[in-house]
Image (tube, grey):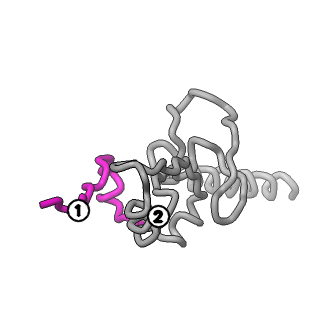
Amino acid sequence: GQGKADEGSKRSLIKRRAKTAAMVKKRRHSGRNKPAGARGHVRRVRCETSGCLVPKDKAVKRYIVRNIVDASALRDLQESSVIDGYALPKLYRKVYYSISAAIHSRVVRVRSRVARRNRAPPPRFRPKSD
């Protein structure tokens, strides 16, 4: 009587394996910026908002260039400056976000299955200088 029970459990195991083998892949690169058989581990970086450790190739990266002072103070500084046409230095920062933090803080948006294939950068909106 033991042989039939073992055979039945083997069949169910094979059926389960067949079902799990047909899993679909959501992204061709599994959300990482590396080729399929390339590297094992990648250095981890800290997320800007949540502070969690994220693999560097998976993190959402943004390069932020900002003025040291805000626009209203910038105008006052330029008026009171001795040197004419003095350009204030800028702050340059490379910022990393985890995927969940980037979606939550609206750095990136959730895209449809078709739109996910679009790898072109979004259009830049520059203020018109007349």
User: Which disc number belongs to residue 107?
Assistant: 2
Q: Position of residue 12 (x, y in %)?
A: 68, 57
Q: For residue 53, say whether it is visible.
A: yes
Compare residues 115 and 57 and report the one nearer the observer: 57
Front label number (1 vs 2): 1
Compare residues 11 and 112 and report the one nearer the observer: 112
Q: Which quadrant of the structure image shows residue 15?
A: bottom right
Q: For residue 25, say whether it is visible.
A: no
Q: Residue at (63%, 51%) from the top-left corner?
A: 17
**Mark 1 / mark 2, whichever is N-terminal:** 2
At mark 1, the secondary structure is loop
Q: Residue at (83%, 51%) from the top-left corner?
A: 3
Q: Position of residue 112 (x, y in %)?
A: 35, 65
Q: Residue at (46%, 56%) from the top-left corner?
A: 66
Is 22 colored magenta in this rendering? no
Q: Is residue 124 left or right of residue 23?
A: left
Label 2 Cα crowd, 10 Å radius (few <14 / some 14-19 / many 20+): few
Q: Which span is picked out in magenta?
A: 109-130
- Judging by the rendered image, the residue that carries numbered circle 1 is 127
Q: In what quadrant of the picture does the N terminus appear?
A: bottom right
Q: Which quadrant of the structure image shows residue 37?
A: top right
Q: Position of residue 115 (x, y in %)?
A: 30, 59
Q: Amino acid at mark 1?
A: Pro
Q: Amino acid at mark 2?
A: Val
Give the CA separation, mark 1 to mark 2.
20 Å
Q: Residue at (40%, 48%) from the top-left corner?
A: 83
